[in-house]
Image (cartoon, helix red, strand yellow):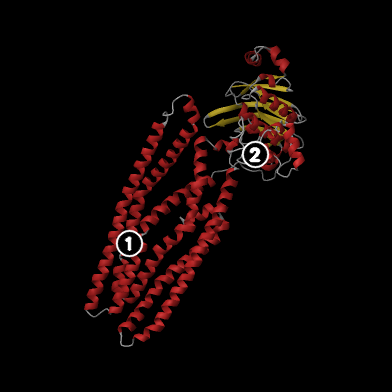
Amino acid sequence: MIRTLLRVLGAEHTAPVRRTLTLMVLAAVVEGLSYALLVPVLRALFGERPEEAVPWLTGFAAAVALYAVLRYLGDLSGFRGGISLLRGMYHRLGGHLVRLPLGWYTSGRVGEVTALASQGVMQAMSVIAHLLAPFVYAAVTPLTIVAVVFALDWRMGAAALLAVPLVAAVRFWTGRAMAADDAERSDRDREATDRVVEYLQAQPVLRAGGRVDHGLRTVDESLSALQRASRRTLLSALPGALGLALTVQTVFTVLLALGAYLALGGTLGVPEMLTVLVLAARCADPLLSLTDIGSQVRAARTELDRLDTVLHTEPLPEAPDPVRPPHHGLEFDSVTFRHGDRTVLDDMTWSVPDGQRLAVVGPSGAGKTTLLLLLARFHDVAAGAVRVGGVDVRDMDAEDLMARFAIVFQDVYLFDDTIEANVRLGRPDADPGQVRAAATAAGLDEVIERLPEGWATGVGEGGARLSGGERQRVSIARALLKDAPVVLLDEVTSALDPANEAAVHAGVERLMADRTVVVVAHRMRTVQDADHIVFLDGGRVAESGTHEELLRWNGHYARFWAVSEPTG
């Protein structure tokens, strides 16, 4: 598990983990060795001159003090290391996630990553802060004590040594028996959480339809499955716990009987026998704790394995020698893109010169939004090339590529912060005047004026405290503030009321001015002013031309226009 932990954390965290582990092992060894001083102490106390025990007691106290210092340093290093590793793990995970292709984030995987980033990372990093110390002391201290017993009397040591393979066998058997049940319980826990969240999010729809009870059956079934999995986990742990307790008790009884036999036969002194029994009793607690520790370690290891899997997911490759394009014309050159077994775009070719507007229209599922995602390199193409300024996006630096795009999607996500903070995401170093100017151009200023807290208004998670139109205005203001030379628009007015649509449309027009623009249009009247239009059907370019040309051809576009704009 330590190797997995170090692989997940990265090479820069290897030294602190090893230092912590070394301190804990030293503390456990010193604790075990300190008990050897009990023999001369007991000999002196049982002898004719008890005062001779004082130097040995002093030595024992010094050994205990050394153990206490090492234990303190080890635990402190563990807690500090755990906090440092937790911060580093979040940075590493976050840095890796932003480099993964957007297609990797399926709906199920988003929930998995959410759970991993919240509970999973905390549980995995708890190994250093909370689990490593008790695990080391439960394993190393008893082994050191066995060595001490061996030094006192080889017969008693041999008897104590029998406990090592027995305890190891019980732990191995218990771990194998519980592994599948632990994994199932974890899966059922995640599924139950998803069903509860789903039910809560569906409340507006359920109440509007008078079906509040709808969905409860699914929640109940998932909770019942979690209960059954938890019961199986508990039952699978019970034999191991009982077996470990029986093993420890049996070994202690054997040592007691053997010690009494040897002492009565005169081959083992009373001080040695008492010391062995004290040491055997001291071994019992850490050994019995292995059941609980083992369960926690398995859970942490499961999360570590999941983290390891995510961190070893290959991101999009980066160009070794990035090229900066000389202009901002856009081009699709025989582009083919597949999602799983489905071909989304097939041998697609088009171009838009620097400073012109391209409108993309077509039925649902034609690949319009995918086209925008490929321009911003959220995915890599299966064949062909996507170019910006004549340069393949795969040959550009990722940050340089994204700096050239201002993207406004139909579904706007805002962070749980103030309106101003969300606008400033476009350019964090912008001065207040630039932020206000962008807001005015986007029509956001009138929204801010009617909010009691103005710019300091919190938008809620995902922008829940704002309407759809207000969220779009924030998004457009953010794009205006970024002032990128290329604008990608996924029809931003299709779900807005007339008042918001007019305000957002005005903001979009300001955003598109003097820039290279690709706009995905669902409402056909938004494409008339485009310099060029491509009509997609089945992942291919079915038609292309200007608005007037496409209407004259009376083909796909003309029929689409007639249906969408029946009044002309």
Residue at the disc numbered 2: 457
Q: Earlier in the sequence, mark 2 or mark 1?
A: 1
The residue nearer to you, when weighing 165 against 465, is 465
Q: Mark 1 Cα within 10 Å, few/some/many (few <14, many 20+)?
A: few
Q: Are marks 2 and 1 in contact (CB under 8 Å)?
A: no
Q: Amino acid at mark 2?
A: Thr
Q: Which type of secondary structure does the marked residue at label 1 adopt?
A: helix
Q: Position of residue 264 (x, y in %)?
A: 22, 78
The residue nearer to you, when weighing 320 against 145, is 145
State which quarter of the image contains the C terminus.
Answer: top right
Q: Amino acid at mark 1?
A: Pro
Q: Position of residue 557 (x, y in %)?
A: 65, 16
Residue under the point 57% across and 24% down: 365
Q: Which type of secondary structure does the marked residue at label 2 adopt?
A: loop
Q: In this view, which residue lies farthest toward the front?
A: 452
The residue nearer to you, when weighing 277 against 535, is 277
State which quarter of the image contains the N terminus.
Answer: bottom left
Q: Mark 2 Cα within 10 Å, few/some/many (few <14, many 20+)?
A: some
Q: Is residue 179 left or right of residue 269?
A: right
Residue at the disc numbered 1: 165
Identify the disc placed on residue 18: none
